[in-house]
Amino acid sequence: MTANAACVTCGNPLNDTATGRRYCSNACRQRAYRERSSTRDDSPHDSALPAPLDTFVGRREELAALGRLCAEHRLVSLVGPAGAGKTRLAVQHVSKRADQVWWTALAPAPEVAQAIYHAVGAHPLPNRSVRDAVIAEIEQHRRPLLVLDNCEHVLAEVADVVSELLACCPRLRVLVTSREPLRLAGEQVFALGELELPPVGASLAEALRYDAVLLFGDRAVSVDRSFEVDASNIADVVAVCRSLDGMPLAIELAARRITVLSPADILARLGDRLGLLTAGPRASDDRHRTLRAAIGWSYDLLSEAEQSACRRLAVLGVPFDLGVASRICDVEDALELLTSLEQKSLLVVERASGTTTFRQLESIRLYCRERAVEHGEISLVADRVVDWVCSLVEPEISSFFASPSVVLRLDRNIGLLDLAVTRSAEVGDWPRHALAIVATAWTSTPRGPRGAPTELLHRALSQPLPPPYRSVLTVLAAIHHRVRGGWHVTRTFAQESLAIERADASRPGTLARALEVLASAEAHTGNPELAWQLYDEAVELLRFSGEKLARGVLLNSYGWTLLQHGEADLAAPLVRESLTLVRLLGLPHQLNPVLHTAGAIALARKSYPEAVDLFRESLEVGSEHPMDQFYDLEGLALGLVGVGSDDERALSLLTAASAVRTRYDFRAEPYWQDLLDEARSVCRTRITAGRLRAAESTGERMSLSQAVSYALTTMPIAEDDDGVISERELHVATLVAEGLTNRQIGQRLGISPHTVARHVTHARTKLGLRSRAQLAVWAGRHTP
């Protein structure tokens, strides 16, 4: 601190024998004690600790975790985006602390050291700095805690002061609230995000267990005592909380509008949330009176490059990866830029299946998008999205099948494709519009199937296009109609694509693709002999191409078509080779259809246990893309019926898969449809009327992902179940099988929905069941 040691009371130099001492005499020590006693009592000093007038809602887990972290480490930074409730959580934490606490509000402070000096109640020392005085005061306490609130605008100065204080005061602990960490050695970062959110469709009892809903209700009641979160408005309250990303400030501001707007009205106006959420309490800090001001505080602290990135990324409106961000921000590598924005709590990082994507909280995105409009950057960003999509797709359109890495990148950024399609159409750039549609056709999500919409394909084909682009679009249109059973339309489009490819003869991959699609159409429109010739020509084209994936896909298509025409023995070796090739490549979504064909061949040979195993494997490997799996649910059901082991489960799976076919107009081939009809007929003859309806009802209520989970779950053995659950739990289970909700069951039995939910949970746990649907099936089996 200073070169020569001096007495902290009088300032006189200390001699060499006074090493480690702070006073030159007992008189100075007593004087210092009297001065401290005259200005401070013996109780812990709270240094103007904020005293909130509202209640602290939720955050129990975060509060406990923060307490543990602060107990173990000397420097903790509580960081999060605007309106996450950092200050409120810090106040709640330190209010429980019995030791000395100093609270320093830095939002209005012009100078950090001076603000800390006043907060700790330090005394001036002769010929000594403000920092020396602060250190002298801190050293008088056994376990002091210094809280520095809202540091983001003076981050460098805070880091400098904190580093020095921690080095000179070994008993000191520091808690910082900020929108980004200090980046000091030993710093522990506690990231505070959104409040826990209920799922869409949550019941009243379930939703009221979530902090976001509880906060909305508490703040709404504070301004309107007549308001109550109930069954009539719970769906809208949940939707409001989810739309606001579970951010406490936004939820509080929305709840304060309940005096003049219903939850449904608030939800309808959230498109203009920055104008709506402006009713903060008068006593609040200026930054917390409106959502716009809270976000604007963070935005104004950014560098010019960071502000530009925030604006441009906000135009996307969907999650994006690093490559997209680099293209949109016009930098070679946006890693450092995204890292900085994430540390400033302006980006959310999401990791799944080994990939990383980024997104902005919706309120932050809307604010930054307004800034993008002011800077005229909307069209600029849209054009760069089109550039990015076309740069991936164009090199792939001459191949039989797009490379898996390209499809994966498009899948990961699927939300951008609509923007690329719309923008390219707006400017009349039809070749690039065609490429954007191709990208759409190659991708899928867990909630939607692969393939471009019919109207997009047909509209694009009505525009002037280069031959290679037209060829790839016509073959995609053929595939689109093939899965919907439109074989004659499929044949027409495939013939056009084949004519283009034969005229050029320089793209064996796309020529083979046109041959494959046309061959399948010819086989189903009455010309199987021509179909086999076309398939053989395509196989020969790819024999020495080195495209193992393309050859695997082609052989599987050939085998599947042969099987449908009664040629299981001819199909088997083709599918075995296809399975070997695709297994080597390790691509689950491509392995899925080949396993299906192998399972179908096992069905044709009446090897039902083998078929069950193959369809189960297909469901397991394709779990990331459940929309590709309705065929496998049907195949597994056919295998179960053949084995005769679980007709009710089979019927539930058939019903769930049928709902997917109806929703997306996916029509089964006549061969496959006959098998499905026969299996349903067998199930209806084997299952009693009550259990039949329960099994069908279960299938109707399940989503596709739930059906896949149900298909892969081992059911408990009926003989071991007797007497496991109580009579009341059994009664509740039978009503679940009838399709009643918890509220309806409660009304019938005279108990609360919460009690019903508890009975359902207990019954499922005792029986080892994973879902309400499985409980309904179990009840159908065990009740007359």
Image (cartoon, rainbow, N blue to C red):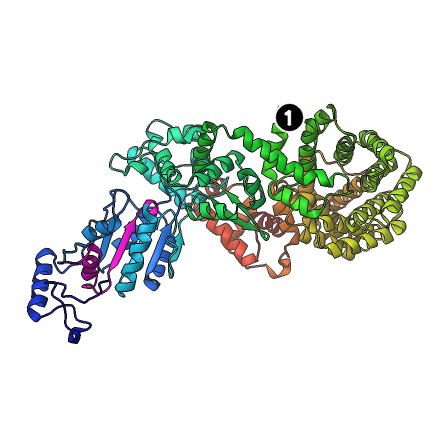
Residue nearest the observer in this picture, 34 or 744:
34
Q: Is residue 748 above or below residue 226?
A: below
- Residue at left 35%, top 35%? 293
Q: Is residue 536 above or below residue 274?
A: below
- Residue at left 77%, top 57%? 609
Part of the protein shown in magenta: 127-153
Residue nearest the observer in this picture, 534 or 650:
534
Q: Secondary structure at mark 1?
A: helix
Q: Position of residue 451 (x, y in %)?
A: 70, 36
Left or right: 341 in relation to 277: right
46 falls in the magenta region: no
Q: What amino acid is found at the position of numbered circle 1 in the picture?
A: Ala
The answer to whether residue 108 of the structure is visible from this angle is yes
Q: Position of residue 359 (x, y in %)?
A: 50, 42
Q: Is residue 257 above or below residue 726?
A: above
Q: Position of residue 653 (x, y in %)?
A: 68, 46
Left or right: 195 in relation to 777: left
Left or right: 121 in relation to 380: left
- Residue at left 92%, top 37%? 530
Residue nearest the observer in this picture, 136 or 81:
136
Q: Position of residue 384 (x, y in %)?
A: 59, 34
Would you name the residue on which mark 1 appears?
425
